[in-house]
Every structure is written in structure tokens, then in C-alpha cells.
Amino acid sequence: MRVFFIGFGQAGGKVVDMFMEQDKSNLFRGLVVNTARTDLIGLKNIPMKNRILIGQTVVKGHGVGTDNAMGAKLTMDEIDSIVTAIESVGTSDIDAFVVIAGLGGGTGSGGSPVLVRHLKGLYHEPVYALGILPSIEEGRLYSYNAARSLTTLVNEADNTFIFDNGAWRKEGESIKMAYDRVNDEIVRRFGVLFRAGEVGKIGVGEMVVDSSEIINTLRGGGITTVGYAKTEAISTRAKQSKGLFGNLIGSLKKRETSEEVLLGDDRSAKIISLVRSAMLGRLTLPCDFKTAQRALILLVGPPGEMDRKGVEKARSWVEENIEGEEIRSGDYPIDSNYVAAVVVLATIGEVPRIRALLEMAKETKVELARTRTDGKTMFEDGIDPLFE
């Protein structure tokens, strides 16, 4: 799948920078937009011509702080220059746009919905958003920004992937370590998903997941979460065992056949277990996965590990456990010593984290309105101002 990534703001820019670092097949294109010059300078894998600084005449390259209304306005004012930069990179052969932003700050939170709307008006390809939610510990203002941005994004984008920072925090971890780990988790999941269908040295899968499969899974809009699980390949363990005990074990044909049958059963069970772990484990956005309207299962690993019976059973298990009936599945063969499962749960109907975020935003809106007037009330009576 040929994806054009656009990173908006500091968080979005760093994620796109990592995508470009890991793109060895030139499937991805990347561009970043920011109001802060230092954030653009700190990137490593995006060409300078693809780093777009906006709002220079207003904020002088120092960013908008947490003012996402300002971020939206500056983006509207300079949307033509952003689109021109996108066109200069090339859009003729892409399958989709993915706009990535942290939703708690100012530039990405405010600017990404504006860009998504304009891209949808200009191109036939789907435009997806990948929004990173701030943790509750980052403060009420960040949650308020995220709620406003997310409410807008869901209405504008063809689908909105969500990654919840709060669900991935670890005690005692520094801010840099936390952000680096979160970004790595994002790139691992979505990098595998968007590379599916790529023709590599090993060839294509038995059940190919191409761009149309992904697009059809996401076509319902709303919010989507992604699960991931990984384990060692059985063939790797078998090779290790053969190296250790090959001189002690005979090579009778009957025994080899029996072992192959057992390995086949193991592979089937492993795939089912992986898919269950991906759904029941740490989703990018913890939620009631049963409310998903569509799902996509992608198995990644050596071709010999892609057991068809296991894939079919895993697919049946997912079908039994979500409301929707559209379940797509396939494999992506790569030369590796591991097997991984990516599960996309699209158009989720119930997300407690989002409901809590929206409620907090409502309370914060009232508090912000009161704070703006509290400092003025002591001057309201008794003294006339110099001018009205």
C-alpha cells in the first residue's frame, strides 16, 4: 500500500520521521508541517524541502503553545502552500493519505482537521487520521484540546486511528523514553499493516491483503483501534533442536512425517493464540472490541508458518466476538524468525476512554470561561475606565 504520511506538529513529525527511517521499499512518502522551527530541525529522515514551516509572520517560528484554535487558523491561512508542497512530493500513484498528529498540543491538534478536510476536497484517495491522545496526567487543557480536535477529525476523516498515550505509560519512565517507545509501537503496527501485499524476495502471500482490503475495512468511518502480538516461529525452534540433537535422533521417514503433523497442529494453535492475544492484549485504544463493525486480520512471518487452518479458525473466533460480519484476513510472508498478528478493529461503537475525555472537556470548558472573567470582576464597579 502506497501511503503518503503527513506529520502535523511535533508528535506527528517524529512518527513520520520514524516511518521514513524504516521504509526500505520506498512505499511511503513523507512530509511534515509545524509552526515551531526547532521541531523541524530535530528530524533526521525527512528531506529539508519536505519540512514545512507555517505561521512565521505570526508566531515567528516559535510554535503556538497549546492554542489549537491558533493552529487551525494558521493552517487555514497557509493551506495552499501546504498542498503545493504535497503535490511537489508526488501524489499520482498513492493509495491513501495518513495525517498524523498529537491531539493535545496546538499545531497538530488544530491543524490536522483543517488539512484532512482540504485533502478530501482535492483527492479521490481516502484520507485517514492517526491521532495520539494525551495521558490524563498531562493536564486538563491537553485533554480539552484533544476532545475538540478528535470531535472534528472524526467528522472529517475517512477513518480515525487512535493511539492512547495514557494506556501505554510505564512507571519511572522518562518523558523521552516514553515517547520513543510509544512512537516505536505506532510504527511497528502501522508499518506492518501498510506494507501488506508488498512483493518481496519470498513472494506474495497465499491470501493477499492489498490496499483495497484495508480501504474496504476502514470505509465506515469513525474510530479504529489496532492490536498486535508477536512470538517466535516454530521453524526457528525446530532448527535449533535439530542442531542440538541431530546426531542423536534417527531420520526415519515415519518419524519425520509424524513430527510434521505435530508441527502443523502447533502452527495452527499458534496463529489462533496470536490473534486472540492481539485483540485481548494492548490495543492502540483500549475499548469494548465487541462493538467493532469490521475487522482485518494480518499474519506476518515465514511462509511455512502461515497455516491456513489456523487462519480460518482465528477468523471464525473474531467473527464470533464482534458485532460486525465483515472480517477480512490474509498473510504477509517475510524472512523472519518470528510470527506476528495485526488485528484492525474498525468503527468501534463504545470507548470508555473517549467518553471520559469528552466529559472532562466539558468541565474544562466551563472552568476556562470562569478563569477568563475572575481576574476582571474586582474592577467592574466604582471606577470608570479610560475608554470603552
Image: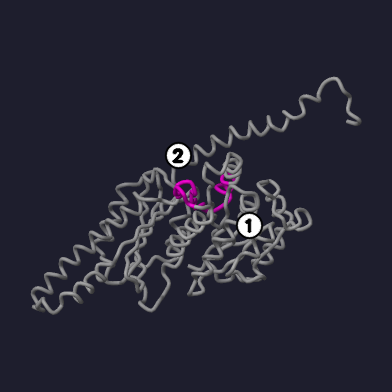
* Disc 2 target residue: 352
- Relative to the observer, which residue lies in front, 219 or 98? 98
* Disc 1 target residue: 121
- Secondary structure under tag 1 reads helix
**Where in the figure is residue 166, as x and y percent of width and height?**
48, 46
Q: Identify the residue at horizontal 19%, vertical 72% (top origin).
A: 241
- Relative to the observer, which residue lies in front, 8 or 217? 8
In the depicted structure, whether residue 119 falls above or below residue 137: below
* Mark whose residue sits in front, 2 or 1: 2
Q: Which residues are magenta?
A: 150-173
In the depicted structure, whether residue 67 falls above or below residue 314: above
Q: Quadrant of residue 265?
A: bottom left
**Where in the figure is residue 186, as x and y percent of width and height?**
47, 58
Q: For this view, does 242 lie left or right of residue 223?
A: left
**Where in the figure is residue 310, as x and y percent of width and height?**
25, 61
Q: For this view, does 81 lie left or right of residue 256?
A: right
- The disc labelled 2 sits on which kind of residue? Pro
- The disc labelled 1 sits on which kind of residue? Gly
- Secondary structure under tag 2 reads helix
Question: Dividing the image into 4 quarters, which one contains the C terminus?
Answer: top right
Q: How many marks?
A: 2
Residue 347 in view: no
**Where in the figure is residue 85, as x and y percent of width and height?**
67, 67
Residue 188 in view: yes
Crowding around mark 1 (Cα neighbors within 10 Å: few <14, some 14 to 19, many 20+) is few
Magenta region includes residue 155:
yes
Tell which residue pokes out farthest to the front in this image.
172
- Measured in 3D between alpha carbons, the distance from the residue under mark 2 to the one under mark 1, in whole angstroms, is 32 Å
